[in-house]
Structure formats: C-alpha cells, structure tokens
Amino acid sequence: MRVAGTVRIPGDKSITHRALLLAALARGSSHIGGALTSLDARSSARVLRRLGAEVSPLREGSVVVVRGRGRFSRPAEVLDCGNSGTTTRLLLGLLSGHRFSTTLTGDASLRRRPMRRVSAPLAEMGARFTEHRGDGLPLTVRGGVLRPLRYAMPVSSAQIKSSLLLAGLAGGVEVSLLEPHGRSRDHTERLLRAFGYGVTECDGWIGFRPGGRLEPFELQVPGDPSSAAFLVGAAVLAEAGELRIAGVGVNPTRTGFLAVLARMGARIAVEEPTIHFGEPVADLVVGPAGLRATEIYAGEIPGLIDEIPLLAVVASRASGTTAFRQVGELRIKESDRLGLIAANLRAVGTRAEVAGDDLLVTGGDAPPRGVVQTAADHRLAMAFAVLGTLPGARVRLDDLACAAVSYPRFPETLRGIARRAR
Ligand code: S3P
C-alpha cells in the first residue's frame, strides 16, 4: 500500500467526555468545538440530559452547546452508559457529591467491567453504593456530604484518578492521590486548573483543593491521538508515500506510542506545534520504515494503554520479539484485550503469547491471513483492519462497525489514505 494526503481525525474522546461532564455541571451555556460525535461521546451526552443538562445534538462539524444548571437533578430512570467506561467512572465521582440515588448500567461489555476500583475510594469519601450483580454494573450510587481523601491508587488509571478528583469538585473537599507507576493522562487536572482550582503535584502526589469556580466555558477539542495511532500505524507499515495527520493532541501523557514507534525505527515528525486551550496540538507526518523489536516497560504503559493493540500489530511486522511488560490492565478493557490480541495475532499467522502479565510478539514478513474475533472491541477491530492493508493480506474481521465507538468514519478514512501500489 502507498499512503498519501492529509487527514484530520475526530476529536479526543477523553477530553470530549470531560468537557461534556464539566459543562453539564456549570451553571449556564458552554460551547464545545471539535467534540467527538462517536457512540461513546453520545453516551455521555445522553446520560447528562437525563441528569438535567441541555446538550445539543452531537453532529460532526458543529459546536456542541451545553446548558448546565450548576447541579445535577435526580434522574427518573436507570442511566445507560452504553459501552463507555469513562462516562460511567467519571460520573460515579460527580454523583458521589449529589444527595440522591442514581443507578448506572451499560452494554454487556461495560456491565462486566470492574467498578469497585472507583466505588471503594468513593465510599471512603462518604458515598454509598449498592451492587446489583457483584463488581460491575448495574450499580447504584447515593451521594452525600463528602470527606477529604488521601489515597494511594492500586493502579495508574486516569479513570480512577478523574473520578476521585471530580468527587472532590462536586463535594467541595480536598483530594490527594498517588499513582503507583507511570503517569496516566492528565486532561482532568489541566481542565480543573483552567477553572482556577488548585491542582498540585508533589513527590508523585496529585493534590486537588476546592475553591475554584466552575463557570461556563468555550473549548476546542484537539484530534484524538489514540485514533491517530491507527493511521500512524498504517503509514508506518505502508510500502511508500507519506501521510500528514493534522491537529492531533500531543499531550505528553498520551504520546508514549510515538516514542515506542521511534525506538522501533519509525519515521514520524511532529510539526506545527501549538497550544490549544491548555493542550499541546501538532501535525504528525509519517512515512514507511523498516522496523525492529523493542521492549515496552511497565512505567510506559499508562501513557500508551489504548495504543497497545495497534503497537502489537506493528510489532508483528518488526524483526525480533517485542515485549510489552505488565499489561494485565488490558484484561479489563472493552474486552479481554490481552488474550484477544495474542489469539488474533496467532490466528493471522504471527507468534504471540501472554506470559504472566506480559505480552510477547515476534515479527515476521509472511502476509497476514486469517479470521479475527473483535469481541465488538473498537480498538481491536481498528488495529487488525490496519494489518489488513498489508500487501497480500487476507484479514477477515467479524465486525468493524464497532469502530464507531470512538472513530465514526474509520473504515472510509483508512480506505482514503491507501492508494494501492500497482
Ligand atoms: C481513559 C482512561 C484510560 C483509557 C480509556 C480512557 C480516560 O483508562 O483506557 O480509554 O479518558 O480517562 P484507564 O486510565 O482507567 O486505564
């Protein structure tokens, strides 16, 4: 395949969720440009409407207008968060500071995902939880008067961290958090700082102090680096050409995959850097390269957690064995990503194995051929669709429609960047 042209990618999913949640909690009208319009973003918009905010329809190319009331109101029904773990976990934090009961549920994948990782520390702060089916959804939260929290998190996770910071915001109490190894994405901290809240960092502890003011705001959401990663991967694996991906968020807590690809020998230039509403943004210019294996250390994992399916696919074309260390968290994403990455790589003819919590992928150059089971996991589907662009590949996915969870027009975009070499 030859790649060519310039593409823009959809808005950042993490920032879109946070912007919608905070706008819904502010009193007055906020305007969010470049917001992601995917199924996950719609899940946030849908539940926020049920909590009393007015949220305009999420349409590509239009600014989302959110009119919040300063507090959420008690919803009349169970809130369905669809496939979105971020919606669920961040909302549990905000609802912990509201004195009414809300029950959250989601699709089959989300109902299986663990929620005690947020409900346990939120309960320490004073919220009460009723589990309906063990550690997962449905889950009822009853908020109350919250106590300050000082908490060493068992895993580095932006969802846990953000949930607890947002509980501090909704409850007006101090929160101090320690992430064990590696820093997870810091979009919540950046947004809270922009609202004038004290967010400090000292000896690894992140501190939140109430006292800012959540005012309505205007925000432009940068392109999602996690979505860009699939196009970067396609361009790195191409036979010829060059691809420019414009307006990508390059927050250093999100760009670990670029550092790994550079170690593997990829040619990626970061051009036209600017800062947009407190977040660094740039164009990525990517061309094909010969690749060698690398080791991805435990401390790097939080900064590239969503890019591991794509990196594993790229590693399957590199010379040598790439080791991803301590990636057990992948077992509890939208699917058991750890098991499915390895099983699907084997299904298309690559040597791949899970050893404890490590993933090992040995590269080769035979055309990938086989049937891939995506378990309706958007990132698995997109990663293996990239593998399907290789010369001679015959990769059949059971489902690519699930890409719409984070990247609404991914199949068309992938086709658009590929100019078949004669
Ligand atoms: C997210 C955090 C990550 C990531 C998810 C989005 C966020 O989860 O996998 O897609 O927006 O906070 P964890 O930080 O919980 O691993």
Image: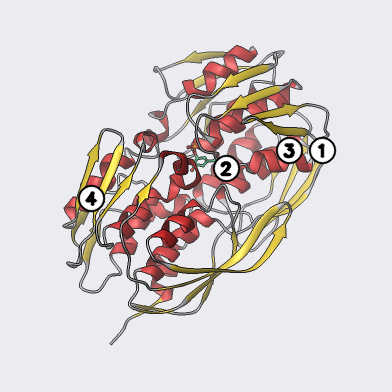
Give the percent coordinates (x, y) of residue 163: 60, 29
* Secondary element at image label 2: loop
Q: Report, in whole angstroms, how far the alpha carbon at label 4 lies from the one at label 1.
A: 47 Å
What's the residue at 59%, 57% (across, down)? 250
Q: Are marks 3 and 4 in contact (CB under 8 Å)?
A: no
Between discs 2 and 4, the one toward the N terminus: 2
The label on residue 192 is 3
Q: Are marks 2 and 4 in contact (CB under 8 Å)?
A: no
The label on residue 196 is 1
The label on residue 185 is 2
Q: Is residue 35 visible?
A: yes
Amino acid type, residue under disc 3 in the picture: Leu
Q: Report, in whole angstroms, how far the alpha carbon at label 3 lies from the one at label 1.
A: 7 Å
What's the residue at 56%, 18% (across, down)? 121
Identify the residue under disc 4. 344
What's the residue at 54%, 63% (across, down)? 9
Q: Report, in whole angstroms, how far the alpha carbon at label 1 lies from the one at label 2.
A: 20 Å
Residue density around tag 1, few if under 14, some if 14–19, many if 20 or more, within 10 Å: some
Left or right, residue 37 beside residue 392: right
Frontmost of labels 2 and 3 is 2
